[in-house]
Amino acid sequence: MSQVQDRSAQAEPIDWLPIAATIAMMGVFAITLGLTYPLLSLVLEAQGVGAGMIGLNAAMTPLGIIVSAPFIPGIAKRFGAWNLSIVFTVSAAVIMLLLGATRSLEAWFLLRFLLGVFVDGLFIVSETWINQLAKPHNRGRIMGAYTTVLAAGFAVGPFVIAEIGSSGWTPFLVGAAAPLLILVLLLPVRRRVPAFDREEHASIRAFARAAPLLLVAVGIMALFDSAVLALMPVYGLRVGLEEATAALAVGVLVSGNVLFQFPMGWLADRFPRRLLMAACVVATILGAALLPWAVGHPLLLWPLLFLWGAVAFGIYPVIMAELGDRFTGAMLLAGNAGFAVMWGVGGMIGAPVAGGLMEQIGPNGLPLTLAAFYGAFLVMLCLPKKSLQ
């Protein structure tokens, strides 16, 4: 972009209200989604359901995301993104009430699958809105703010369960009330969010041909997310940490994610994004290599976990900013749908692969798995390309 174009882009006014409302909306919804995983796992554990079946039941939400993602862009264009967001928000609240009304494992398989569908629609629409409303000169910071609020919402969910417990109707009512609060945030900006052009068409397959590396990046990060959230406590216990310390390790790692999203978005507005992404990947591999050594040195373990979470998840605002800079219209919508698919795929692969390797070679199978996948991605990043394709 020329200097004249850059100054013109910076001078163009930004409508901050719909951006703020959409970010707040997804932060609130992330709280609901964040509390479902520990809540439903605790309820099933109390019913005597085995760990394997609990994990399989939890996989229904990412499965719903994967299956529905290819259809969301077409539905949004046909019926309107605004209408879709309202229907899916109300539907998510209804699902939470139905989960509270029945403790049938079989019913929960279907309900959690449907929850994944509604989650998927909201994420695709909201991320497309935010990217459309942002401008090139501040897109990284805006996406950093969005991912910060999103990560904080996911982190708050488990604390809600720790505070109110998993028994009775209360946690399910809280989970249902949060999506309904979204309606309050959306109504004032109904006429200020972008509409999707019904005449434009693009598919996830077309986006994958245009930007395969962005899709791989999302999948790798989702793989890291699912593996560490599910297995970091197990890793801690198997290397000799106390249960409370092993649980705290996850919290410290997630804190790095929450606090570094905006700084990474700020850096994405100032440095080459491919270089920034490569730096995060190298730092993530280094963190995985240092983890087995650091567990024996508590004063080093906590800062390592904090920084490891920061760099491993730090690629997300960079990815989102790159998506918004390169694509518009139907292709942007297809890109967000593709990201949803890869998030589901990575989420379903991460924990089983890392867990299987931990069973084969011991607890260090977790950092080895993460280092291997991020190493493969680093090789892709180092291949000569003119842009992030």
Image: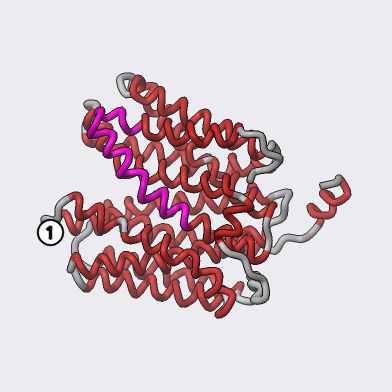
Q: Residue at x 64, y 43 (%)?
A: 388
Quarter assignment of residue 91: bottom left
- Which residues are drawn in magenta? 341-366
Quarter assignment of residue 48: bottom left
Residue located beneath label 1 in the image:
47
Q: How is the image coloured?
A: secondary structure
The picture places residue 231, in percent across and down from the top left corner, at 29, 40
Regarding residue 303, the answer to whether it shows in the image is no
Q: Identity of the amino acid at label 1?
A: Gln
The picture places residue 274, in percent across and down from the top left corner, at 64, 38
- Queried whether the magenta region covers residue 185, the answer comes back as no
Q: Residue at x 37, y 25 (%)?
A: 291
Q: How many marks?
A: 1
Camera-nearest residue between 197 and 254: 197
Q: Residues within 10 Å of mark 1 (few under 14, many from 20)?
A: few
User: Which residue is most to the right?
Assistant: 4
Regarding residue 130, the answer to whether it shows in the image is yes
- Queried whether the magenta region covers residue 354, the answer comes back as yes
**Residue 267 shown left or right of residue 181 in the figure:** right
Callout 1: SS: loop
Name the chief secondary structure element in magenta: helix
Quarter assignment of residue 372: top left
**Residue 45 shown left or right of residue 69 in the figure:** left
Against 214, residue 25 (above or below) is below
Against 332, residue 159 (above or below) is above
Q: Residue at x 63, y 52 (%)?
A: 210
The picture places residue 288, in percent across and down from the top left corner, at 41, 28
Q: Residue at x 31, y 56 (%)?
A: 59
Against 388, residue 54 (above or below) is below
**Residue 208 shown left or right of residue 371 in the figure:** right
The picture places residue 172, in percent across and down from the top left corner, at 28, 66
